Amino acid sequence: MLNLPHELRINGNDVRWGKIGSGPPLVAVHGTPFSSQVWRRIIPHFASHRTIYYFDMVGYGQSEMREGQDVSLGVQNDVLANLFREWNIDRPEMLAHDFGGATVLRAYFLNGLRYSALTIIDAVALSPWGSPLVQHVRQHEMAFSGMPDYIHRAVLRAYLQTAARSPLSEEALNIYSAPWIGPVGQPAFYRQIAQMDQRFTDEIETLYTRMDCPVTVLWGKDDDWIPYEMGERLAALISAHRCTLLPETGHLVQEDCPEAIVAAVLKSFRVTRNTLDEDQ
């Protein structure tokens, strides 16, 4: 498990974060309904090369959860921009998945953040998106929030499993379920689903253009949440390279094929180093 010993108060929310390693900065941004623990088997591989910053997004993981909280994509990019300032980093390498992808793109196109490289995985970035469960919860948030605990746990575990092509281990299911259980976690789970709104990607979709850093787009070929065609579209808009499709891999690449992420990021280190050498 990754340790998140630090806490920052950002825009009225307590945000938990941690860092490991040494060297130039790399920031890892998770998606929904996960937490920074999706990187637990990945970012330790980079600790001898980079200082890796990771955090739980507002309303997720170990960060604050409360009634009436805005946990939408509309706030997450501002939180990321604040973290950059608090960490005193500039142009870090970025690793982003799902809602983390949307957050990193919104921060780039709306907040003016800049990166030295980006590896983006099965990102929420282009319309349409939102599963049938998302649409249903948005209409009946309170009913879901008040379900008996045993029913909620069953729904939660079933939903998490749909993110991966291979059966999730009991350890993984427990790690990803833990923040969403209990009198605080259960309503928080349905709160973040109810606030999923396509307008937050629609408002940047028209801004997409080739980014001013190397961009690697990875996508699970068997992603049942966001089809791989979305990855191909996204790569054509923001990257100089085609989307890399990962066979027998679902949306949760961190569990189905973590080695592909490790390989892609290590390759980006070489590209970044070569770019810096050319600039000098």
Image (spheres, rainbow, N blue to C red):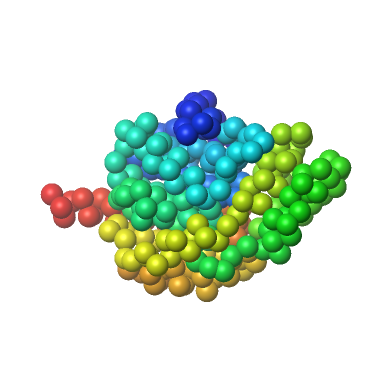
Q: 259 or 210: which is nearer to us?
A: 210
Task: Please state the horizontal and vertical placement of residue 82, each as a whole percent of the image.
Answer: 40, 37
The quarter of the picture where the N terminus appears is top right
In this rendering, position of residue 132 left or right of residue 93: right
Rendered image quadrant of residue 80: top left
Task: Please state the horizontal and vertical placement of residue 103, each as a whole percent of the image.
Answer: 46, 51
Q: 264 or 7: which is nearer to us?
A: 7
Q: Is 124 above or below relative to 32?
A: below
In this rendering, position of residue 23 left or right of residue 129: left
Q: 219 or 209: which is nearer to us?
A: 209
Task: Please state the horizontal and vertical placement of residue 79, each as a whole percent of the image.
Answer: 45, 40
Rendered image quadrant of residue 206: bottom left
Q: 105 or 266: which is nearer to us?
A: 105
Residue shown at 36%/56% (left/top)? Answer: 109
Residue shown at 36%/38% (left/top)? Answer: 84
Residue shown at 37%/65% (left/top)? Answer: 208
In this rendering, position of residue 276 left or right of residue 190: left
Can I make out residue 167 in this image? no
Q: Is 64 above or below relative to 106?
A: above
Task: Please state the horizontal and vertical placement of residue 133, each as a whole percent of the image.
Answer: 72, 60
Q: Is 60 above or below relative to 167?
A: above
Q: How many marks?
A: 0
Q: Is 178 above or below relative to 9?
A: below
Residue shown at 45%/61% (left/top)? Answer: 203
Can I make out residue 100 in this image? yes
